[in-house]
Image (cartoon, rainbow, N blue to C red):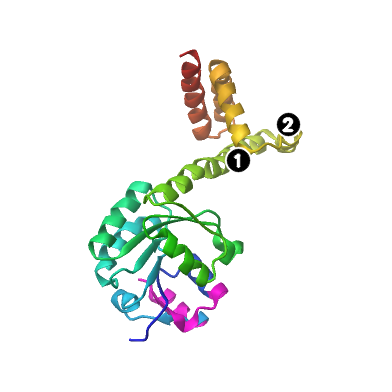
Amino acid sequence: MMQCELALIGFGEAGSTFAAAAGWGHRARGWDLLPSRRAAMGDVGVIAAQSAEAALAGAPMVLSLVTADQALPAAQHYAPFLAQGALWCDCNSVAPDTKRAAARAVEAAGGRYVDVAVLAPVNPARLAVPLLLAGDGAEEAEGKLRAAGFTNVRVVGSEVGRASAIKMIRSVMVKGIEALTDEMMAAAEAAGVADEVLASLDASEKSQPWAARAAYNLERMHTHGARRAAEMEESAKTLLALGVAPVMTRGTVLRQRAAAGKGKA
């Protein structure tokens, strides 16, 4: 078996993007459940292993780049094939508890688990994508990832789950804004006022650091949450009349009302 510097479990967008950008070639071996993705490994010179066991044999570092629902099964099923002391870098977007469960499987088999949070789309950032690392092996993993070509790597702690907590909680805002945008634009277009709504948002936009913005938003909710909840109930009625389900808006009503209660307390 040819010695390799790293193994890739999963060769979708992330794995193929990283491999092409880094030019790992035969320094890397890969495994994917889909034959088409295993075939794609050859396009960038990565050795397509005949099994997960063959991909992991002797590899000092593994990048787990599967879908979120497969992150834990991959760790559980493939951990027995790890070389002793190998770093399992779990780069998947899953909850801290999921990563802690995966860590138990990896460490029980003699590997070392590293919680990796990927904080931006891999395209176009590629090897400059921000990576946060946590776990006992995070310091060593940082060095190996930098040696593999990654340029934006930072250790955030020794506790597995810390990096993923940052990622998952951040996603509440990032993905929530996307969902709110969809809800707002559907209603604005149905009402024929999209240009005016967007122009109004441009006019009211303030450039602030997120710490200041979060503090301001929370203070406003605590002080005016009851009134704002009532306003948002009317917004929900507006969307319903336009044929748009106010999924996010109803959640805003609940949050504003709860914040008002905290303010009174």
C-alpha span from label 1 to label 2: 16 Å
In front: 63, or 42?
A: 63
Q: Is residue 13 shown to the viewer in this render? A: no
- Give residue 263's position: percent from left, percent from top: 50, 17
Judged left or right of residue 90, residue 14 is: right
Residue sitting at the far bottom: 1
**Secondary structure, magenta segment, majority class:** helix
Residue sitting at the far top: 264
- Check residue 189 for magenta coloring: no
> Which residue has dot 2 on it?
204
Looking at the rendered structure, the secondary structure element under dot 1 is helix
Could you tell me which residue is drawn at 44 percent across and 70 percent down?
11
| Identity, as a three-letter code, of the amino acid under mark 2 | Ser
Q: In which quarter of the image is the N terminus?
A: bottom left
| Identity, as a three-letter code, of the amino acid under mark 1 | Thr
- What is the span of residues highlighted in magenta in the rendered image? 20-43
Placement of 162 over or under 257, stated as above or below: below
Labels in figure, total: 2
Q: Residue 172 carries which label?
A: none
- Asked which quadrant contains residue 232, the reply is top right
- Check residue 26 for magenta coloring: yes
In front: 72, or 144?
A: 144
Judged left or right of residue 234, residue 51 is: left
- Asked which quadrant contains residue 127, the reply is bottom right
Could you tell me which residue is drawn at 47 percent across and 19 percent down?
262
In front: 226, or 197?
A: 226
